[in-house]
Image (spheres, rainbow, N blue to C red):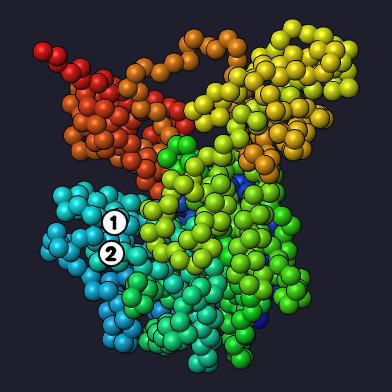
Amino acid sequence: MISSVLVANRGEIACRVFRTCRELGLATVAVYSDADADARHVREADAAVRLPGAAPADTYLRGDLLIAAARAAGADAVHPGYGFLSENAEFARAVRDAGLVWIGPPPEAVEAMASKTRAKRIMADAGVPLLAPVAPEAVTAADLPVLIKAAAGGGGRGMRVVRDLAALPGELASARAEAAAAFGDGEVFVEPYVVGGRHVEVQVLADAHGTVWTLGTRDCSLQRRHQKVVEEAPAPGLPDALVRALCGAAEAAVRAIGYVNAGTVEFLVAADGRPYFLEMNTRLQVEHPVTEAVYGVDLVALQLRIAEGAVLGDAPVAAGHAVEARLYAEDPGRGWAPQAGVVHRLAVGAEVSWGRRRGLRGGGPVLRLDSGYEDGDRVGVHYDPLLAKVVAWAPCREEAVRVLARALECARLHGPATNRDLLVRTLRHPEFTGGRMDTGFFDAHLAEVAAPPDGARLAALAAAVADAQGRHPFGAWRNVPSQPQVKTYRCGDADDEIRYRLSRSGLEVEGFPDVRVLAACRERVVLEVAGVRRTFEVAVYGAGAVYVDSLHAGSYVLAPLSRFPDPTVRSEPGSLLAPMPGTVARLADGIAAGRAVRAGQPLLWLEAMKMEHRVVAPASGTLTALHAAPGRQVEVGELLAVVTETEEKTS
């Protein structure tokens, strides 16, 4: 029997595993990098062991340090979570060789599926349908579009869609570099890219006694940059025959490699309904909560029991529908660049433990929040920018989608910019609500679902009124005549100037003829807008940004602007500033100060939160300054390079 579990991971998944361990009476051990010294998963564990350093390669990817940590803390089992070494056969084998219980599949099964190219050969022999790879050097224009994929790992890293044959060599090089940085293996392969397909997967669970559960389907088609954004179970609209075929193929895959423990078999379902094997994830998936919600099970608890040698009984029966949204720290105004900084407030409904959840399964909707952050925690630059997973379960899909969208809309998210608005609009988009989405959803609809809300001016008014209340209490306005006041706030790239005057007749605001101030304090402002009462919540942390939340106008982050801006805070024309904090991963070949560049030409790549982000020349001209060098740490807004634009000759 297991008594103490070390989670060889961090953040949200470590917290999630610890929750189940506590319910089962197991002691917990965390590991942490220097960057994670104050992280939530460290606080929640019974014991924690430091991994010196900050970069994943020096910490969470060091199997020897993880095993030493387990021994030092007295753990007798290791749960790998997902990412990092969760699908590393050598690590799984080393854990077992150290006399520890590996809470995952046999190393041989991990090894069989570790390389997607090898996995495809095994699946072909097992009769599982799949797409045949194409040799990179043999790709022709007739084969386009094609998809480049990393042979090791996942999460969208090392993955590229190529629609132009001339771009293939550069994208291959970029994918190999990103795969090598993320997984320590730069092998990639090329396969046909199926347009209009759906990403459907099957959750599997197998014990060491020959029992295999296939716990239905999940739809993970809504992906941006090949990373899943919204997932649900069961996959909507699939014919029963197709569901049976997918589950049958998944079971064949499990038995072909002698798989034990939890895993996921992923398929691409083409528009004509034909399924193709994509890969098998030999670990727990990020989206596992939707399956837990629908089947009323705890997959982590089942992983632990299987690792102890338990026999799976009869498979549970599905009920209702569940939808999960991934809340990321990323800024839509900066090309969705990942963000870092303090999480001042993270409030999304009420967290429900799965012990209580099982008792509510036959009732109304239930909301679940899985997160590695609490108020006051800091999002760093070294790891994935996932803030939280928000999951809603309800008796039917329509209700689950509605509950999740409303929960996100009502959330209070103060700190780094997030993709919250994208999620809410996606969940309410008619293509999604109608179950007609595919992997091209965001290619077709990103502009409309990511558009900023249009109530920024009302939010700025609420911020100005709240600020005025801090200096002149609302009830005293009538007795404090004053000169006109001006407050300016920046939201994105737009500035809103608010002019108001405190008079004996109340607060007089210029430019808002249909708006009246009904009540105000520093934290809340009530406005009557065109005859309708609206409430705005206002929060300020220190001397920084102002956060305004309103169910009517939306949520905004406003930057107060000084009436007397600092003239020294300027950037030279053509300056390339770091869009995010991170590390300069590499420079383009031949790039140096004095070289001619063309508009859109890649100059360098920043690595932040396990992804590479390309920085390109803003115009054609000369690279007159280059301050970036491989390995250099940069902060957001830091000067990387300067391109002096070429002046066009006039005749």
> Which element is circle 2 on?
loop
Contact between labelled residues 1 and 2, with CB atoms less than 8 Å apart: yes
**Which circle marks residue 634 in the picture?**
none
The spot of residue 253 in percent (x, y) is 39, 83
* Residue 87 visible in the current orientation: yes
Considering only vertical position in the picture, is 495 above or below 446?
A: above
Residue at point 59% right, 26% down?
A: 559
- Taking depth in this image into account, of 180 and 191 the one nearest to the observer is 191
**Which circle marks residue 161 in the picture?**
1
Considering only vertical position in the picture, is 410 above or below 398?
A: above
- Judging by the rendered image, the residue that carries numbered circle 2 is 193
> Which element is circle 1 on?
strand
Residue at point 81% right, 12% down?
A: 503
- Taking depth in this image into account, of 76 and 524 the one nearest to the observer is 524
The spot of residue 395 in percent (x, y) is 67, 73
Is 219 left or right of 488, judged from the image as shown? left
Considering only vertical position in the picture, is 285 above or below 207?
A: above
Crowding at mark 2 (Cα within 10 Å: few <14, some 14-19, many 20+): some
Quarter of the picture containing the C terminus is top left
| Amino acid type at image mark 1 | Val
Q: Quadrant of residue 527?
A: top right
| Amino acid type at image mark 2 | Tyr
The spot of residue 72 in percent (x, y) is 60, 61
Considering only vertical position in the picture, is 243 above or below 499?
A: below
The spot of residue 507 in percent (x, y) is 78, 19
Is 484 left or right of 604, judged from the image as shown? right
